[in-house]
Image (spheres, rainbow, N blue to C red):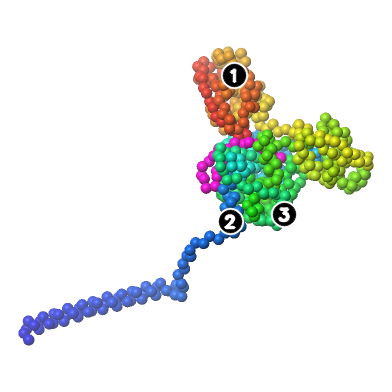
Amino acid sequence: MSFYDKVRGQKFLSFTLMVFTLAAGILIGTIAQTGAKAAKEQAAAPDATPLTIPKAVVIENEFTKVAKTLEPSVVNIETEYIPKTNVQTRNTPPNTRRRQQQQEPDDQGDDNGGGLPDLFQRFFGQGGGGGGLQFGQPQDQRSASLGSGVVVDPNGYILTNNHVVENATRIKVKFHNDSTEYPATVIGTDPQTDLAVIHVGRKGLPAAKIGNSDAIQPGDWAIAIGSPFSFESTVTAGIVSAVSRDLGQQDSTSFQHFIQTDAAINPGNSGGPLANINGEVIGINTMIASRSGGYQGIGFAMPINTAVKVYNSIIKAGHVTRGSVGIKFEEANSDLLKVYGASHGVFVREITPGGPADKANVKPEDIISSINGKPINKGQDLIDMVADSDVGSTLKLGVIRDKKTLTLDIVVGDRDKVFSELAQNGAGAPGGTTEGGAQQLKFGMSVQALRSAERQAMNFKGANGVLIASTEPGMFADDIGLEKGDVIVELNRQPVNSPEDIRRIQNTLKPGDPVAFHVMRQAQQRVGGNGEWQSLFLAGSVPANQ
């Protein structure tokens, strides 16, 4: 073998050895790394098996079906209002508010100076989750509140609580899975049952199915849907805890007999539906018993049978008319009944002069024992039967007088007329007079007659018109641009010569109607100003509760 061949053989051997060594190193390193990684992965739970997510399978129960059926009919209601020192709102604690109000005769019941206990609270959320107006807020500060409602007619009619829309200057409604805010107007309210009907300009809405609250009994399932603390479409479930629950004999609650439930309801649920297991509305959630203002297991809903009667009256006449016979009574104990020769009934304490009872010859100290042959065992029986009777209908009153039984025919009167002091005029009612002779009118403004001396001082040459003395911030007049010092010369194209003209025209309008003001405005609004008068036309739609 030549020297050259020997050298070439040694080089090949060396190269082969180097390649082998490198390959062995890589192989050993890979095995070591893999083993170390495997050991690391298995160190936390070496015997654990990875989890897998199964295919989605929808599991439905009766509550799920109720929620799917009813949720599209439940709405979120947002209201805007300006608290006034002279307007009592539901945000005032109930016991405080009732002390401030004049006590009313309770339409055949006892005068009672008490109010709802502190723990009974009607409620609706403020600003997305509050419990009402915080004391110390600046007067006239705009406030927003939240509540719920339920669509009962596809043409846009919604049942809710009166305290949800009470004193509201604007009402906006949102529907399930729809972020659009729709303006709403108040069709009518009934403070006696704390119910209201509002309307939105939409058709084909999903209306809830109405049940019969007379059929429910303690222990039945109850499902509440609403917007507690602004959380829309919240569903809670419980049972009916009691039926026909009376919260005392307060005059303002004479027409309120509640369904009690432990379904969780909270601020913002007010006005929403309480449903049975079939998805039928059996009540309108109204108040809770709570020392904290939140859910404590006792809630109250107005029975739907009562709500239906109120609703039907409101859509027919815009208000609720109740019957009265014009008496005040006392609950009679057994000893008093024995003295007067009766076994049951209520004791007549006073007769309203000129009222139905007076005309029918009912006397103080009579015992009313029956109506149309049905026994009267307590005052609430009398209130319910008379209030549900049509005005103008005739009832046969069973009376015990001097231990003798009499039957008297009595014609049912209108409660608000029989007890005229019960008529609610509210803030800004027609006829109110403020300082300086200005008359407070609807739409949040006060006006006064424009006398010749004032015309001369203002250099106003117009033949007719009334002067705007003031406007309330945030109310309709302010919103459309009316100002203090403007002279209204026409309203809806009708000439205005006096405040009575404005009031007359206003009384023909209903929420949602267009209204246009023709006003004259001075460039410099001050008495004696020499600015020129401008002709302006300002218009809007009649808002809710103004």
Q: Are marks 1 and 2 in contact (CB under 8 Å)?
A: no
Taking the image as shown, residue 32 lies to the left or right of residue 167, namely left
Q: Amino acid at mark 1?
A: Pro
Was residue 129 drawn as part of the magenta stretch in this picture? no
The answer to whether residue 374 is above or below residue 326 is below
Mark 1 to mark 3: distance in Å? 60 Å
- Residue flagged by tag 2: what amino acid is it? Thr
Residue at the spot of label 3:
217
> Would you say 63 lies left or right of 403 here?
left
Q: Residue 398 appears at what percent x and percent y?
A: 87, 41
Give the structural element (helix, strand or loop) at label 2.
helix
SS state under label 3: loop
- Residue 338's spot in the image, x, y percent? 92, 46
Location of mark 1 (residue): 495
Q: Which residues are magenta?
A: 172-193
Residue 329 image position (x, y, % from top left): 83, 40
Mark 3 or 2, nearer chain start: 2
| Quarter assignment of residue 75 | top right
Foreground: 324 or 127? 324
Label 1 to label 2: alpha-carbon separation? 60 Å
